[in-house]
Image (tube, rainbow, N blue to C red):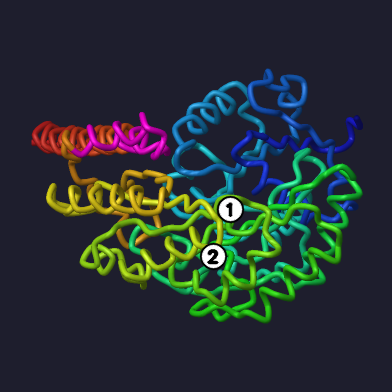
């Protein structure tokens, strides 16, 4: 390690290996060679010697569920090592930059980082960065120019084949963060990454993918492109991929893209026994409120087709949506139980949580009927339901409590300021 080089401390957690791999993989080696690279992984002790150095940049990437933990940590780090510079990026800083800035970060990177992060590093080395929030242009990154992984994180993630979405679900921020676009990685780029993975791990069998809607690969985002899907699957087969996993997490599918033509095409190639599909509710009325863009009938048809072609449907549902009544919740559970009885699906349960950069970010989680909870627990006990739906309830309450505490703090400060002004005016008199 050279004392002449500044330190670049990468804060690696299991939940951010994908995002950190993407931005580090986008950095040219000659740029990274200008730093002493320091990996601070998970629960390892903080690298005190490196953090004590005057010219040190520490990098964080995180999502909403990790914000409180990251906030506590960066506060402690900044108090102990006030001379270091900190930057954060990822899903949560992109969705709620001001809130992340208030955690104590010197720099907050908003948007896609493949181009903006290397640019930031170059400027930081020259002392040309100003503290604050840095915005990258929306939906401008060409996926083909970047590998999407880095050996620094010691993880070969699912290959990102598509980014963005043309739908507008009320609970989801993907369309807005990507400016309503859908971009695809080319076959040549995907093939290159596959070969690189096999170089690093020749024994690897399974290749998984990252996409908001796997069956939309190569399409306009509104209907399947059978030719593009076929070309993808044939290329992967020719490249010698032993187990192609498409449609399994994190490359789930939409019900309206599960057609007989698609299933006829993909079934001979796929090795994943399960296909994950977002249905969210069995009510056409709630589907409209959510702006899902598909119907209950399409969802049932998709579940039926997945079963017909030998796949286990692992279906996402959401309870506790804004202004949801107990009757609607009973209707949701009735629908899930009907699909379990008819098609032996597995339910992946969620509870609505307001996410930043979504149309429903300021909406409240609806109370969930105790009888509905009992029925969900019963489905869990029989192995028909999984998911972190109860954690989502607790997380929402924690966040709501914190927001209320902040509001009380603001009101208290306003009152103190008001009475201070009165006292000053009185003293002058």
In the image, residue 188 sits, relative to residue 220, either above or below, namely: above
Residue 17 falls left or right of residue 395: right
Image coordinates of residue 169 in percent, x first then y, are 37, 65
- Seen at 47% across and 53% down, the residue is 313
Q: Quadrant of the N terminus?
A: top right
Using the image, tell me which numbered label, if any, was put on residue 213.
Answer: 2
Q: Position of residue 341 (x, y in %)?
A: 33, 48
- Which mark is nearer the camera, 1 or 2? 1
Give the percent coordinates (x, y) of residue 43: 64, 21
Label 1 crowding class (10 Å Cα cut-off): few <14, some 14-19, many 20+? many
For the residue carrying disc 2, how many other residues have a C-alpha within 10 Å: few (<14), some (14-19), or many (20+)? many
**In the image, residue 378 lies in the stretch drawn in magenta:** yes
Overall secondary structure of the magenta section: helix
Above-or-below relation of 298 to 352: below
Answer with the quarter of the image where residue 54 lies: top right
Circle 1/circle 2 CB separation < 8 Å: no
Give the structural element (helix, strand or loop) at label 2: loop
Label 1 or label 2, whichever comes before in sequence order: 2
Give the quadrant of residue 266: bottom right
Residue 212 vs residue 423, the one in the foreground: 212
Disc 1 to disc 2, C-alpha distance: 10 Å
Q: Which residue is mark 1?
A: 248
Residue numbers of the magenta segment:
372-393
Residue 402 appears anywhere in the view: no
């Amino acid at each position: 390690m050279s004392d002449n080089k500044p330190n670049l401390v990468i804060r690696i957690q299991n939940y951010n290996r994908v995002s950190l791999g993407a931005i580090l993989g986008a950095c040219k080696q000659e740029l990274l060679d200008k730093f002493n690279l320091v990996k601070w992984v998970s629960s390892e002790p903080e690298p005190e010697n490196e953090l004590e150095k005057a010219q040190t940049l520490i990098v964080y990437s995180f999502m909403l569920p990790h914000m409180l933990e990251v906030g506590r940590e960066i506060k402690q780090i900044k108090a102990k090592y006030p001379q270091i510079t900190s930057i954060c990026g990822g899903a949560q800083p992109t969705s709620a930059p001001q809130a992340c800035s208030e955690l104590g970060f010197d720099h907050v990177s908003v948007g896609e980082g493949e181009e903006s992060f290397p640019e930031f590093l170059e400027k930081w080395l020259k002392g040309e960065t100003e503290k604050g929030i840095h915005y990258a242009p929306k939906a401008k990154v060409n996926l083909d120019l970047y590998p999407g992984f880095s050996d620094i994180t010691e993880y070969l993630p699912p290959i990102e084949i598509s980014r963005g979405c043309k739908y507008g679900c009320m609970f989801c921020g993907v369309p807005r963060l990507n400016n309503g676009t859908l971009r695809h990685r080319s076959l040549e780029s995907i093939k290159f990454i596959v070969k690189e993975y096999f170089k690093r791990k020749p024994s690897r069998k399974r290749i998984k993918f990252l996409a908001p809607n796997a069956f939309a690969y190569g399409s306009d985002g509104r209907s399947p492109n059978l030719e593009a899907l076929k070309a993808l699957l044939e290329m992967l087969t020719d490249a010698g991929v032993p187990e192609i996993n498409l449609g399994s997490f994190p490359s789930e599918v939409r019900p309206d893209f599960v057609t007989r033509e698609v299933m006829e095409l993909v079934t001979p190639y796929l090795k994943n026994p399960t296909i994950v599909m977002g249905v969210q509710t069995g009510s056409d009325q709630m589907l409209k409120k959510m702006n899902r863009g598909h119907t209950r009938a399409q969802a049932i048809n998709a579940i039926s087709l997945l079963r017909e072609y030998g796949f286990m449907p692992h279906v996402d549902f959401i309870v506790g949506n804004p202004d949801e009544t107990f009757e609607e919740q009973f209707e949701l559970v009735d629908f899930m139980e009907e699909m379990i009885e008819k098609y032996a699906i597995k339910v992946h349960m969620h509870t609505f949580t307001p996410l930043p950069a979504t149309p429903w970010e300021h909406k409240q989680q609806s109370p969930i009927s105790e009888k509905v909870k009992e029925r969900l627990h019963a489905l869990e006990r029989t192995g028909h339901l999984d998911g972190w739906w109860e954690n989502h309830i607790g997380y929402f309450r924690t966040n709501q409590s914190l927001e209320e505490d902040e509001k009380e703090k603001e009101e208290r400060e306003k009152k103190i300021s008001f009475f201070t002004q009165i006292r000053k005016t009185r003293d002058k008199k």
